[in-house]
Image (cartoon, grey):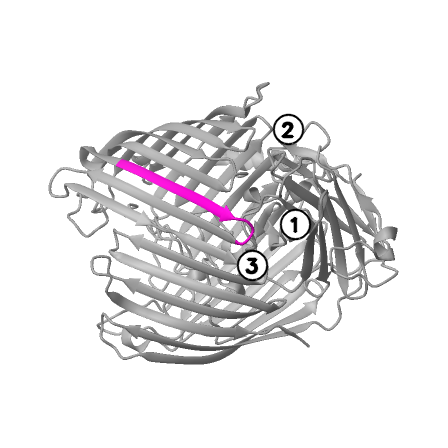
Amino acid sequence: MRPLVLLFFITSSLAGYAQKKNEAYQLPIRKSSDLIRIDGVVEETGWAQAATATDFYMVTPMDTSKARVRTDVKMTYDEENLYLLAICYHALPGPYIVESLRRDFNFGKNDNFLLFMDTFDDQTNGFSFGANAAGAQWDGLMYEGSRVDLNWDNKWTSVVKNYEDKWIFEAAIPFKTIRYKKGISNWGINFSRLDLKTTEKSSWAPVPRQFPTAALAFSGLLVWDTPPKDAGANVSVIPYALGGLSKDYENETPTTQRGEVGMDVKVAVTSSLNLDLTVNPDFSQVDVDRQVTNLDRFELFFPERRQFFLENGDMFNNFGYTTIRPFFSRRIGLTAPIQYGARLSGKIDKNWRIAAMDMQTGKVEEDGLPTQNFAVVALQRRVFARSNVGLLVVNKESVNYTPPDSGSVYSEYNRNLGFEYNLASSNNLWTGKALFLKSFSPQQTEKDYTYAANLQYSTRKFTVSGQYEYVGSGYTAEVGYVPRNNYIRVNPQASYLFFPKSDKILSHGPKAATSVFFDPSFKQTDSETYLAYQVNFRNLSTFTGWVAHDYVKLLKPFDPTNSGKDTLATGSEHSWNAVGFEFTSKPQNVLTYAFTGRYGGYYEDGTRLFMTADIGYRFQPFVSILLSGTYNDIQLPDPWGRNTFWLLGPRVDITFTNKIFWTTFLQYNEQQDNINLNTRFQWRYRPASDFFIVYTDNYLPETLGVKNHSLVLKLTYWWNI
C-alpha cells in the first residue's frame, strides 16, 4: 500500500495547484432587460442582448477539431430565475433521434443538449439540466467531478420547439432550485451537444475524448455582471396523500386498505445549505428493481432510488468503494417503516461541505424488531485543486432495546468511523482514493478495521490503474454494504486504444485486468484474470471479445445453482476458463439490440452457458419497447445435474407528453419461480408535483395463479412558501 500512498502525494503536489484548464473560455451573463417567456421562440430583447457561446469543439469521434454541428447558447437571469437558451442546428437532413419523452433519458440514445453547472467553481459538485430534441427533461446532481445522479428531481420549466433547420431548447431554472455560494461572480459552466445523425458529441469548452463532457475539470466560466443574490426565504412544503388496496392470496389474508398522509419540507438555511425534513415518507412510486439471476456467493447490490436520500447523498453513499461501503441508505426503511427523518446538507463555503442525516424507524412486532435510529455525519474539506479529505461517522442504535434470551436478536448498536482522501488532479489525468474505516459493536473483536487505496492514470490512448484492499475479520457495517470480510485484494488493470485511419472503425485495443483475493496470511482464495479486445465503430456500435481464467477456494458451503440444492464443501478448490463477447448496435436506428454471451467452465468441473439480449424498438417520441432476456444453462455432476434459468423482462414506456407517462414492466424469474408485473401512471400536473397510479402483481409461473397484488394512488404537491 505504501507505493500507492506515496504516489498520491507526488501527484497531488505536481498537479494540485495547476491553473484551471479552460479558464480562458468565459461567457458573460447579465440581467435581462425584459420578461423571458419559455416558449421556444426567440423574440425577447433580453436574448438579443445576451452573449453567445458558440464554436463548439468536437469531443467524439475525435477531439482534434471544431464541431461540424453548430450550437449557439445564451444565458441571462432576472430576480427569480436563471434562463438558458440553446439553438441546436441540423447538419444533416432527416428527423431527430430520441427514445421517448421519458424524463432523465439515456444520454447515448437521444439527440440532446445538456448544461453542466459548477455553482461553487470547485470543479467537483454541481447541477445538470437539459433536454432531448423532443422535449424530455433531464436534471441531476453532479458529484465526484463528472458523475450525474439523475434520481434527483426539482422544480424548473422548459420547452423544446422544432424547426426545419434546428431545434430550440429554452429553460427557466429558479434560483431556489439550485444551491450556490452567495457573493462569487464566477461559476464553472459547460455545454454538451450530442447529434446522433452525425455521431458527433461536442462541448463549448474542449474536453479530451477519454473523459465525459460532464467533467467539471474542463468547464469554462460563467462570469456574472453582479454576483447572484441570496435566493431569500426558501421553504418548500411537499405533502402527499395516498390510498391503496392490497391482498395476499398465498397467506389467505383479507384485503388490506391503506390511507396515509405524509410530508417533506425543504428549508434553505443559506443559498448553499439545505435542511430536509420528512414525516411518514412513502416511496411506493419508485421504480422496481431490475431482477437478476443470482449465481453469486455474496449479497447483490441494488442502487438507491428514493428521492429523500439522494440530494448530496454522494457524501454518504460514495464514501469507500463499490464493495466497501460503510453507509448504504437502502438499509434504512426496507424492513421497517420510517417514522421521520432530517438531513442537513450542502456547502459551508468553497472548501467545506457537510452532510448530516438522522432517521427513525418504527417497531415490527411480529419480527421482534425494535425502534431503531440511524445517524450519519459526513464532512469534506477540499485540498489542492480538486482533491478532498473526508470524515464519516455512522451510528445505528436500537432504542430502549435489550436482546432477548431467545427469538430474533438484533444488535444494540453498530458504529463506523472513516477517513478518506480523494485525489483528482487539475487535468483529470490522475484520480484515486485512500481509505481507512473502523467499526464499533457491543462485542468488540480484533481486526475491526479496513483500509484500501487505488490510483488511476488516464490519457487518450492509455489507462493504467491499481487497487489494494484489506478488510479485517471483525469489521462490520450493519448500515453499509460490505459483502465479504477477512481478505486482502489486489486489482491491477491496463488498457490501450489504437486510432486507425478507417471509415468504419474509430478505435480498438486491448484491456487486461486481474483481481486476486488472499486471506490475511496471503494465501490465495480467489482470482479472476481477464483479457479483452474492444472495437469501437464510427456509427457508435461496439464489440468486445474476451477470455478469462477463474480460481475459487470456497470459504463456506455454496450451492452453485443458488436454488436450494446441495452445497459444495468449505475448502474445495475450483478453476475454469471461459470465453465471451459483448455487442451493442448503433443507437440511431429505431430497432436497437445488444447481445452478450459467455461459455466455459464452472464449479466442480461443470460448464456454464450464459446469454443476454436487449432488443428495443421505438415509435418516437411516444412509445419505447424493450425486451430483455437472460438465459443460463449450467451443467454439473450429480446431485445438481443440468439447471436452466430464464429471466425475461419486457418493458413498455408510453410517453403521451413530457408530463404524462405510463410504464409497464413484466419480470419472469425462473430461479425465483415468480412473475412480477408493475405498471405505473404518472401525471406531472405542475412542476415537481405528481399524481401516481401504481399497480403490482406477483404470479405463479406454472398456473398464473395470483400470489398477491396491490393498487396505490398517490398525490404530491410542491408548495413554495
The CA distance from mark 3 to mark 2 is 40 Å
> Which callout, 2 or 1, points at the residue further toward the start of the chain?
2
Q: Position of residue 359 (x, y in %)?
A: 48, 70
The residue located at (60%, 50%) in the rendering is: 143
The residue located at (61%, 60%) in the rendering is: 354
Left-right relation of 572 to 163 = left
Quadrant of the snapshot with the C terminus: bottom right
Q: Position of residue 6 (x, y in %)?
A: 56, 34
Task: Give the prevailing secondary structure in the magenta stretch.
Answer: strand
Q: Secondary structure at mark 3?
A: strand
Q: Is residue 375 above or below residue 501?
A: below
Q: Which residues are magenta?
A: 609-622
Residue underneath mark 2: 62
Left-right relation of 451 to 391 = left
The type of residue carrying mark 3 is Ala
Quarter of image, res 239 = bottom right
Is 616 a magenta residue? yes
> Which label is found at residue 378?
3
Q: Residue furthest top?
A: 501
Is residue 368 visible to us here? no
The residue located at (18%, 43%) in the rendering is: 568
Residue underneath mark 1: 382
The type of residue carrying mark 2 is Met
